[in-house]
Amino acid sequence: MVKSVSVLGSTGSIGTQTLDVIEAFPDRFKAGVLVANRSWKLLAEQTIKFRPKVIALGDKSFLPQLKDALNGVDVKILSGTEGVIEAASLADQDIVMSALVGVAGLKPTVAALEAGKPIALANKETLVVGGSIVTKLAKSKGLPLLPVDSEHSAIFQCLHGQPERSLKRILLTASGGPFRTKPKEELSSMTAAEALKHPTWSMGAKITIDSASLMNKGFEVLEAMHLFQCEMEQIEVWVHPQSIVHSMVEFIDGSILAQVGLPDMRTPIQYALGWPERLPHAWESLQISQCRNLTFEEPRLDDFPCLKYAFEAGKAGGTLPCVVNAANEVAVAAFLKGKLFFTAIAETIRACMDAHKLIAEPTLDILDRVDKETRLYAQNFIAEKYDKH
Ligand code: MG
């Protein structure tokens, strides 16, 4: 059977690599739906190449250009938030790759689950912000949440077929990012250009900055807690600069299983789309001679406090992870524009956390409201504290 894939976020880093996988296995996958937010040019090119039935563009302002570029092409074009949600829940799709950037990915993913679609999950915010709602919904519908993030794919593979309640600890690995060895006093002056030079993974700009601040690892801790239904106390982060061991799981009998491979996102994407089968490898694979020097070190929590804040938010639960995420999105956007020092990202998050009054069991609407309020608070905080430089 050829699986028809809805690719939400098809023009981003995970989206384009998902299309690489689809192209590599034409007898297994086809792209049935493509969704992008603003990159109308690339979406038009992808539409001509992959011939999806339906496409959607989140930002309506580029719709005329997109329609122009696809003049004469047989495809249904949807637009706006409602269009994205409609595209995510179309009846004849077999699996949804959720790879939109930011909290904008949450509602379409929920809509896809409500429509009964298995989810290949790359959008972190879906679990970071809406973890309790999304995991409950998936469970009640009997639908899998197949992790695409390399670490969670590793943990998912290590846990596969293991008896329930045999999990002791999750050992989540982190590359440490481009500033892993930078002395504390130099961190504040780091620029966006320096943060964008990731040593092992090639990814989008937002996640590369999150990787430099260890916020990305913090989000992954929150994701792991939801995906694998464990306590924050059961998750440890280990900095592993070679990015070969994608993560490990320790069981109650003391055995540790690891999943290892080259740092190439197409491998976990292929695993998620093909699940529960394994497909032959289409890319370069790991040689054991590349594993001669694997190292693991403790993260520098005091110098990279975002990771600490994520643990704190995970323990508190409720709306606090949503606050951390929204504050981080605003701060990273400002940092990318050169408006902030690197360490001001963490300071902005801390300020938003301190100002927030926790709501223990939020609905999607409450999360929406908290997201908007936090963004406003973060923008004001940044304007007042840093714009005078
Ligand atoms: Mg990752």
Image: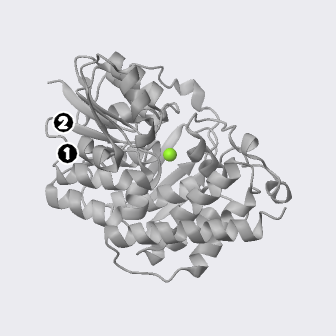
Residue at the (44%, 52%) spot, across then down: 124
Amino acid type, mark 1 = Lys
Label 1 belongs to which residue?
117
Label 2 belongs to which residue?
94
Image position of 61 with respect to 353: above or below: above
Residue 186: image location, x then y, percent: 84, 54
- Give left or right: position of 45 versus 111: right
Question: What kind of element bears circle 1?
Answer: loop
Question: What kind of element bears circle 2?
Answer: loop
- Give left or right: position of 296 versus 91: right
Whether residue 169 is visible, yes or no, is no
Mark 2 or mark 1, which has the lower sequence index?
2
Whether residue 344 is visible, yes or no, is yes
Q: How is the image coloured?
A: one colour
Residue at the (44%, 40%) spot, across then down: 61
Give the label on residue 269, or none: none
Q: Nearer the viewer, residue 71 or 106?
A: 71
Amino acid type, mark 2 = Asp
- Give left or right: position of 166 versus 137: right
- Quadrant hosting residue 268: top left
Residue at the (73%, 48%) spot, across then down: 179
For the residues bearing labels 2 and 1, Cβ distance under 8 angstroms: yes
Residue 325: image location, x then y, percent: 52, 62
Residue 265: image location, x then y, percent: 46, 33
